[in-house]
Amino acid sequence: MHPVYEVVIGLEVHAQLQTESKLFCGDETFFGADPNTHVSAITLGHPGTLPFLNHKAIEHALRLGIACDSGIGRQGYFARKNYFYPDLPKGYQISQHLDPICSGGRIQIRVGNVKREIRLTRIHLEEDAGKSIHDLETDRTCLDYNRAGTPLVEIVTEPDLRSADEAFAFLTEIRRLVRWIGVCDGNMEEGSLRCDANISIRPHGETKLGTRVEVKNLNSVRNVKKAIEVEVNRLVSVVGSGGKVRQETRSFNADDDSTFSIRSKEDAEDYRYFPEPDLSPYLFSESYLEELRSGLPVLPEALTEDLIIRLGLSEYDARQLCDEKELADYFLESLPADKYAKSLCNWLLGPVRSFINEEGADWRNVPIRRDRWEELLSLVEEGRMSFSAASHRILPVLMSGTDESPVKIAERLDLLQDADTGDILNWVEQVLGSMPEKVIEYRKGKKALIGLFMGEVKKLSRGKADPKRTNEILLEKLNQFK
């Protein structure tokens, strides 16, 4: 928090909807195609062409609005937003103006231990522009229209955010939500999630908003945070030196962490909105909206609370599991019984996640079934196999998709531990008898030597001694005589 000024931030998040075709024509939308191969006469705005509405995009927008607790208008229309960019072929964008598909709503964020609810102004549908490429040739700008016409939702917040950290948390939560309900892949590096930040400052206690500056097209969560920090410092410097903030649009240079002016900021009247004459108004039935509501998955915040209350997981563990829907789904599908919740959580957030990251795998493709997890977790909890052996030796075999059970793998690799007290007692006595000086040091107070004794028993037993029972017998023997 700045000692003199309050920071006021509103975000506009553009999320590309996961549809196979564009918002108003059948051109494909997948990322990475050769330039200008996903274009048609409609995309290029040729005279005489007419748009037709992609119903899947409408469905995705409505599902997002329902998830954000937005108000859903039963009917509405599209508008023309008139402005010229070289990468906007028609010279106007089909968007929404006074009648967005979703109004209001809220997103809960968390910064540290503080929860806040950020209000949404609206969620509206629009088509994307193409892409101007300035660094491909030295003396000209190249235009790729593949992205032109791709369906977007724009999520507009109220000016409720008060720091770069809160903006970071909001964008992180939006990215998780759109991925969770399957309306957007959230890949900021591919441009399918982009953010504009409207930033102003005002003295603490002032209620009137200051002059806002918009920083456009931020393409990573880190860049959103950094750009806001940089721009806030610039605004404080301008106002603190007696200057006047100019309403303008700026861009962020990630190479040197600076912002620079692009143009003076337009207002709504500059766009000359009017209803799109080539598209009919739309109308939704209540039964259709109810079908969409009932089809939504349990949302991440609700599932987090359920894992804490029903399964007794810590808040940290529950939030980690609900960071990705695929992980949460796999956890619930694989959990053999409630008593194994903590153990399975540790496995998934530890060695399984590491394996997935190293192999570039996906939670949806993890081949270990629920019955295999029950067998593996039982082996470890019953002391028949160490966690180390199970995670380093058994897990890679199971992840390969084998039909072999954990017990059979352990027997084949000679990994099953001996919990027989007589055998362990014999190993302990051999170890203690071979190092009497260390035993004396332990009894004089050097308790860390217990690790040495445990290691020697492990070596002598070739890893077959149950660690828990070994520790008990060692302590019993070491404390017999003082």
Image (spheres, grey):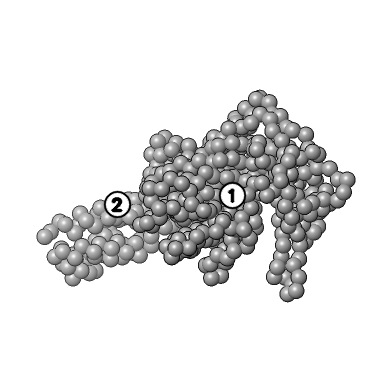
* Disc 2 secondary structure class: helix
Dividing the image into 4 quarters, which one contains the C terminus?
A: bottom left
- Specify whether 73 is left or right of 242: right
The disc placed on residue 13 is: 1
Q: Which percent across, then down, holds residue 149?
A: 75, 49
Q: Residues within 10 Å of mark 2 (few under 14, many from 20)?
A: some
Q: What amino acid is at disc 1?
A: Val
Nearer to the camera, 217 or 86: 86
- Specify whether 350 is left or right of 465: right
Query: Which residue lies at the image location 48% right of the left edge and 63% below the top edge?
Result: 243
CB atoms of marks 2 and 1 within 8 Å: no
Q: Is residue 96 visible?
A: yes
* Disc 1 secondary structure class: strand
Task: Farthest residue to the bottom: give it.
Answer: 138
**Based on the displayed image, in which of its 4 quarters is residue 454 positioned?**
bottom left
Q: Is residue 233 visible?
A: no
Nearer to the camera, 336 or 173: 173
Query: Which residue lies at the image location 81% right of the left edge and 57% below the top edge?
Result: 37
Q: Residues within 10 Å of mark 1 (few under 14, many from 20)?
A: many
Residue at which label 2 appears: 469
Q: Which percent across, then down, holds residue 136?
A: 72, 70
Dividing the image into 4 quarters, which one contains the N terminus?
A: bottom left
Query: Which residue lies at the image location 82% right of the left edge and 50% below the top edge?
Result: 45
N-term mark: 2 or 1: 1
Q: Which percent across, then down, holds residue 299?
A: 52, 38
- Specify whether 332 is left or right of 379: right
The disc placed on residue 406 is: none
Nearer to the camera, 142 or 391: 142
